[in-house]
Image (cartoon, rainbow, N blue to C red):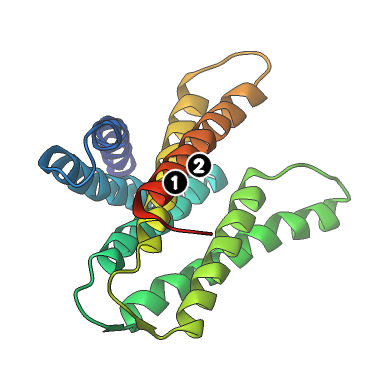
């Protein structure tokens, strides 16, 4: 009963997250529609991630757990990035910044190690979705940790945080869209469903990042 309730919550929040996310991305940045739909998108993505992890606790599902953790971290870092972007004065990083990174490092390391251990134990080789997502998450968390350790004080007017926001929020959207398509769409070859959202989404994120770098005169 509990699992079914969580599943329904997960499906509804996932659909609404994709809808509000699309609305936020298509709206003029910084305007009322973007801010309102973006706020709902973030809240819904938290529900998607948490419900996925809770369901995994009731019925082990590596794929669902992977999507849940990945979604939560990218959504949180995307939300924090816009917070840093809007700073009006110097900000000293603290537990709110370090704790999620620490959790992501531990979980992502486990996501990478577990399939490697299984392959060594069984003598078989396979491409683990959890391992791939775990590696991406591990690299992302290490980069975030390096940035905080390099500069424990974040200064206002750092426009690069907006680019980070676009990448993280966009990445979370891609992960959720991929999970939705993999669950509901069956085509041959199957890898198209896995790769298409990432390829198209990555292209759009890269384009948006380039456009905003040019608009904000960020040189990198």
Residue 3 shows in this picture? yes
Q: Is residue 191 left or right of residue 38?
A: right
- List x then y, in percent, for residue 126: 78, 42
Disc 1 crowd, CA 10 A, few/some/many (<14, 14-19, 20+):
some
Rendered image quadrant of residue 218: bottom left
Instruction: Please state if 58 lies on the left or on the right of 130 as rendered.
Output: left
Q: Is residue 53 visible?
A: no
Question: Disc 2, disc 1: CB below 8 Å?
Answer: yes
Q: Which residue is mark 1?
A: 209
Q: Is the residue 89 above or below the residue 6 in the image?
A: below
Please give the label number shown on residue 217: none
Q: Is residue 203 above or below residue 96?
A: above
Front residue of 48/114: it is 48
Residue 78 appears in which quarter of the rendering?
A: bottom left
Q: Is residue 193 left or right of residue 209?
A: right
Q: Which residue is drawn at the image coordinates 50% and 18% (left, top)?
A: 185
Indicate left or right for 93 with 168 as reference: left
Write down the residue under mark 2.
206
Mark 2 nearby-residue class (10 Å; few <14, some 14–19, many ≥20): some
């Amino acid at each position: 009963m509990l699992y079914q309730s969580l599943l329904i919550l997960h499906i509804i929040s996932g659909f609404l997250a994709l809808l509000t996310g699309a609305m936020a991305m298509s709206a003029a940045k910084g305007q009322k529609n973007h801010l309102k739909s973006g706020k709902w998108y973030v809240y819904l993505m938290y529900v998607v991630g948490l419900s996925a992890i809770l369901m995994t606790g009731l019925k082990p599902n590596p794929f669902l757990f992977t999507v849940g953790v990945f979604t939560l971290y990218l959504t949180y870092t995307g939300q924090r990035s816009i917070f840093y972007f809007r700073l009006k004065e110097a900000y000293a990083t603290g537990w709110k910044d370090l704790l999620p990174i620490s959790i992501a490092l531990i979980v992502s390391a486990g996501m990478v190690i577990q399939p490697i251990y299984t392959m060594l134990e069984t003598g078989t080789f396979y491409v683990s979705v959890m391992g791939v997502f775990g590696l991406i998450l591990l690299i992302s968390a290490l980069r975030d940790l390096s940035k905080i350790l390099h500069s424990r004080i974040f200064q206002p007017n750092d426009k690069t945080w907006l680019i980070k926001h676009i990448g993280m929020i966009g990445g979370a959207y891609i992960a959720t869209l991929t999970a939705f398509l993999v669950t509901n769409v069956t085509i041959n070859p199957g890898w198209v469903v896995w790769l298409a959202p990432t390829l198209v989404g990555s292209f759009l994120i890269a384009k948006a990042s380039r456009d905003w770098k040019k608009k904000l005169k960020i040189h990198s």
